[in-house]
Amino acid sequence: MTERTLALELFLAAARTMSFLDAGRELGLSRGSVSRLIGSLERESGVSFVIRDAAKLSFTSEGKRLLSRLKGAPDSAARSLSMVTDDQILAGPLHVVVSGGQPAGEIVPHLAPFLAMHPSLKVELKIHEELDVQVLEKCDLHLRFSHALGADIDRSVVLKTWRRVLVASPSYLARRGTPAVPGDLPGHALISVAGDVLDRWTLSKASRSESILVYGTLGVGVAGAIDAAAIAGLGIGLSSLATCGDAIRSGALVEVLGDWDCGRVELSATFAAGMSPRPSATALLTHLIGSYS
């Protein structure tokens, strides 16, 4: 039984006995453990469930609402998730980290309906180009853009997958010509990822695979900058439909070597390692799974 589930069982027992001390004895908990569990439950939820200055045990409106949901849950596992479905209980800050070099603009539109459903919740969205262990330890939900590798080694939930594509502006292709095969790429201005390590593009088609070592005329750090550089006519860049899809549809960018597979980019989500997820984090992940499906 997790600590949150134990706190919810304690809360339900207190409502039945009208005493937290009696509920604690029933569950074999000390006075200190009772106080700590209820305090932790309230801090996690961002609201108060108990009126502490009352002569007898009394619950706030949020506490009464929680009790109603707990009494309707069939077992302790269902009770541990009961707060997730109640809009008013989700409150306070929710720390979300986005990593992987893709613009957060892909995610933000999916947050709007979630925040509308939970007006007491504040999502703190932080963008990090690379993984930072200290940052991830403090976040509630980690959304990561990465190259799709197939196997799920970290129990993450894959929300969506996009094709990686080579793109260039119509003006660049009119000026320099359009590559017909991957072997033509070294003769073009290529937009690479900034850094000390040379970029390498791998393209496949049927049973063929070709790898191009990229020493670009321009090195940039994020996917959005690759798209901007390509739109400006600075060369051919390797992007993904997560960021350049609108530009392709508008004609600002043209897909190059579209019959070759350049790989995939996936957006996955994980909770903070070693911690039970907060109800608000669980609710957001559930929302994102539905929004991206």
Image: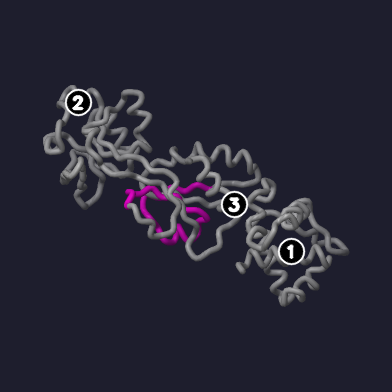
Secondary structure beneath dot 2 equals helix
User: On the rendered structure, is 214 left or right of 133?
Assistant: left
Q: Amino acid at mark 1?
A: Phe
- Image location of residue 180, percent across then percent down: 15, 31
Q: Quadrant of residue 2?
A: bottom right
Residue name at image x 72 percent, y 69 percent: 35
Q: Amino acid at mark 3?
A: Ser
Whether 130 is among the magenta residues is: yes
Q: Nearer the viewer, mark 2 or mark 1?
A: 1
Label 2 or label 1, whichever comes before in sequence order: 1
Q: Which residues are magenta?
A: 124-149
The residue indicated by pointer 1 is: 11
Secondary structure beneath dot 3 equals helix
- Image location of residue 16, percent across then percent down: 81, 64
Does residue 41 lie above or below 141 as drawn?
below
Does residue 232 lie above or below 20 as drawn?
above
Label 2 or label 3, whichever comes before in sequence order: 2
Give residue 173's mark: 2
Return the residue nearer the eye: 60 or 277.
277
Mark pair 2, 1: CA separation: 67 Å
Q: Amino acid at mark 2?
A: Leu
- Image location of residue 269, percent across then percent down: 46, 51
